[in-house]
Amino acid sequence: MATTVQPRTAAVPKPRGIAKYFAWSIDHKVIGIQYIGLSFFFFLFGGLLAELIRIELLTPAASLMVDGGAYNTLFTMHGTIMIFLFVVPMLAGFGNYLVPLMLGQKDMAFPWLNAFAFWMLPPAGLIMLAGWLVGPAQAGWTSYFPLSGPQFSPFDGQTLWAISLHLIGASSILGAVNFIVTILNMRPPGMSIWQMPLFVWATLATSIIILVATPFLAGGLTLMLLDRLAGTSFFSPATGGDPLLWQNVFWFYSHPAVYIMVLPAMGILSEVLSVHARKPVFGYRFIALSSLAIGFLGCIVWGHHMFTSLASWARIPFMLTTMLIAVPTGVKMFSWIGTLWGGKIRFTSAMLFALGFLSMFVLGGITGVFLASVPVDIHLHDTYFVVAHFHFVLFGGSVFAIFAGLYHWFPKMSGRMLNERLGKIHFALTYVGFFLTFFPMHFLGLEGMPRRIYTYDPKYEALNALSTIGALIMAVAVVPFLVNVAVSLVAGKPAGKNPWRALTLEWTVSSPPPEHNFDEPPIPASDPYGYGTPEGAAYLASGGKVALPVSAHGHAHDQPIERPATGD
Amino acid sequence: MTANFAQMQTAFDHEQLQREQALKNARLGLLLWRFANGMAFVFFIFANLLMRNVQPSWPPPGVERLPIGLPLAITLIILLSGAAASRVLKAVRANEFGRAVRFGMATLGLGGLFFVGLLAAGAQVTPSGAYSSIVWAMQFFHGLHVVVASLLLGVVLLGVGRGRYSAERHWGVEASVVFWHFVDAMWIIFFLFIYVL
Ligand code: HEM
Ligand SMILES: [Cu+2]
């Protein structure tokens, strides 16, 4: 496949250069879209598996599945794919596309490495899927020993699972190095670290977490592979190993991974809320620094997944650190509400998904504090309450933010606007379907329905039926989205440079941006969220050419409430 | 004429600036890589500690403590190799490329000796379940890094021989030497956890 570089003279180029997304490219914009495209494919695939799960669970008896093994494979692959092949690379895609543009740069610090990191993912995906050819993994996305050991997982799919995650982890580490260097070393003149867009802050914090935590995943997978292939005994107690070793290292990675999946989503949220509410971000520094605080705390809470297997003295510190995370998270929630307060809110599709995040993530956060409390967790561990909790944060949080980001930046990436009416239908169906699918699971869990079972006591039937109906509504919801993308790519309204009248640098160049991004070094706005301020208005009026100095009493961020919301 | 010269000057400055930026980026990139790579070494220490934790004693009952003579000897060897590696960088910075290659060969030779010693140390371990598993894994993991560091340094030395580097521009040499030191340092820590503690 040859890379054909279309000369971009027309304001809106035809989406012809599709081939370049299937070829090696070191342009961060191409790479960003490659990440987004690949992970969206896996979202649909993982979603398909979820629908099969829900159809099986419609009735208490076995219906689709011949045995529990097939069901085990379904939830294992669903969970693994959604996390490692959808959310993590999707957010990396946003980072790749946006960070250099937001920093006024031509590309990432190491463009070749960037492409290399991306191209580790398609093989990883294929290796994961190849599990179906040799007997797929069945040990859950957590792959606890002994379930993942030779006794219960003799098939090679479990080995492929580990190899695939190894590749994804390595890709993620290389990406993180690239992001940190780009962000720390390549800010344009006139943009201090306190004037970076909050999405860039979030990417910085995420990348730091990746560097700390992902090597532990790699290490744990190495031991799993050695146990499976070289006959070592790390996890098997029969030969002196320790099954808790895997649990410890897995969660040392996987709890921080929750923040790898949610901090960039929160970064997207800060951008979308401020732009579409025409209000300066409330508490800019608090939002920026709380990402670092969450990142730090996130690395010392892993034991909360193991309350039932941990020595009792170790439970209390893990419970307390976990609860502490609610503080920086709450700081963010209140800052976002402060951002909305008194704003001129525009209910665009992007904004609706962002508001969806706010409402759902709060619920997931609150049930998280429930589960952090040891006596509650001992009771609810491995029930549907947990399934409800993590879908509220992962779907209600990350996925809603991903859609908010797609609606917000699609015009920049493609040069075309998405249709707002279809966007709203997509949102409404997703929101209702989501709530219907996952809210009843709280009650199922409280009533004692365990997770990871394919047949269940008939007393749980009614709530499960509701949940399955919700899942079907969500399946329908992606149709208007896909139609919208397909139609808008060809026939959407031309977006122009800055359809949302936003202040960050990616909006000062044409849509889509030229290959080199900026013809001349851009001038960043002194306050990237100065909506409704004279500085912001002047900057927008000049088309990003004039940045006024920061006002005498510091940043506009710190006292937005008194300022009348004047629109732009 | 003057305008032309000024233009050339700016172009030159621009290139200079870009090169400085690239070097700055590469240095930070390598630092971050060492951090992440170091976390993988921390992982093995963490695993080692957890595995001790489930045993009544370490080594576990019935398993003999490993002899320390050979490991101590290879530790000294790798320290020496580190000293030689430092000289490579120094020589390149002084434009003494012949010397750089000689010290580079010494570094590689000592690295090779270390590697052979590491293999022999691995052979001293008798299979004993958990204990031999973690010891072998740590030796294997470190050995892998020695191989990678040697390949890196080897390629760079070929470049030095061909005159690819100068006293001003030698990022490749710097990177391979820095990585060599990283691998040395990691062995010292592993040595403590495998043989001493
Ligand atoms: C179409 C939307 C989705 C539906 C209907 C759905 C449904 C489910 C159900 C019913 C389970 C529990 C299976 C069981 O324990 O027996 C499950 C597990 C899981 N889901 Fe989803 N899910 C959806 C989207 C997502 C997304 C977007 C993510 C992550 C970003 C995700 C991550 C997970 C994980 C990690 C598990 C645990 C797998 C395991 O137990 O090993 N899901 N999902
Ligand atoms: Cu957790």
Image: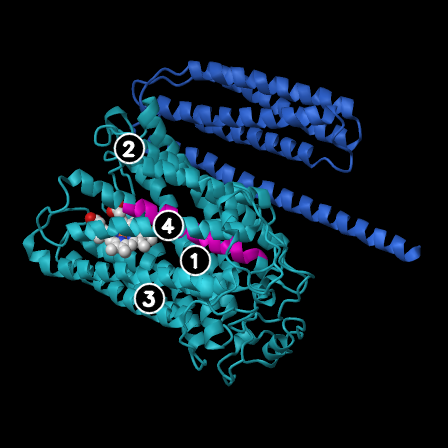
Chain colours: A cyan, B blue
Q: Residues within 10 Å of mark 3 (few under 14, many from 20)?
A: many
The magenta span reads A78-100
Q: Residues within 10 Å of mark 1 (few under 14, many from 20)?
A: many
Mark earlier in primary sequence (2, 1):
2
- Dominant secondary structure of the magenta stretch? helix
Residue under numbered circle 4: A41
User: In x, y percent, where is residue A346?
Assistant: 43, 77
Would you say A137 lies left or right of A40 here?
A: left
User: In x, y percent, where is residue B145?
Assistant: 52, 28
Residue A180 at least partly seen:
yes
User: In x, y percent, where is residue B165?
Assistant: 74, 32
Residue under numbered circle 1: A263
Do the residues indicated by labels 2 and 4 lie within the same chain of the protein? yes
Per the model, the C-alpha gap separating discs 2 and 4 is 20 Å
Chain ID of residue with mark 2: A
Residue under numbered circle 2: A133
In the displayed structure, A314 sits above or below B56; it is below
Mark earlier in primary sequence (2, 3):
2
Q: Nearer the viewer, residue A346 or A372?
A: A346
Q: Nearer the viewer, residue A358 or B108?
A: A358
Chain ID of residue with mark 4: A
Secondary structure found at label 3? helix
Mark earlier in primary sequence (2, 4):
4
Amino acid type of the residue that numbered disc 2 sits on in the rendered structure = Leu
Residue A405 at least partly seen:
no
- Residue A426, numbered label: 3
Question: Would residue A89 be counted in the magenta stretch?
Answer: yes
Would you say A237 lies left or right of A254 here?
A: left
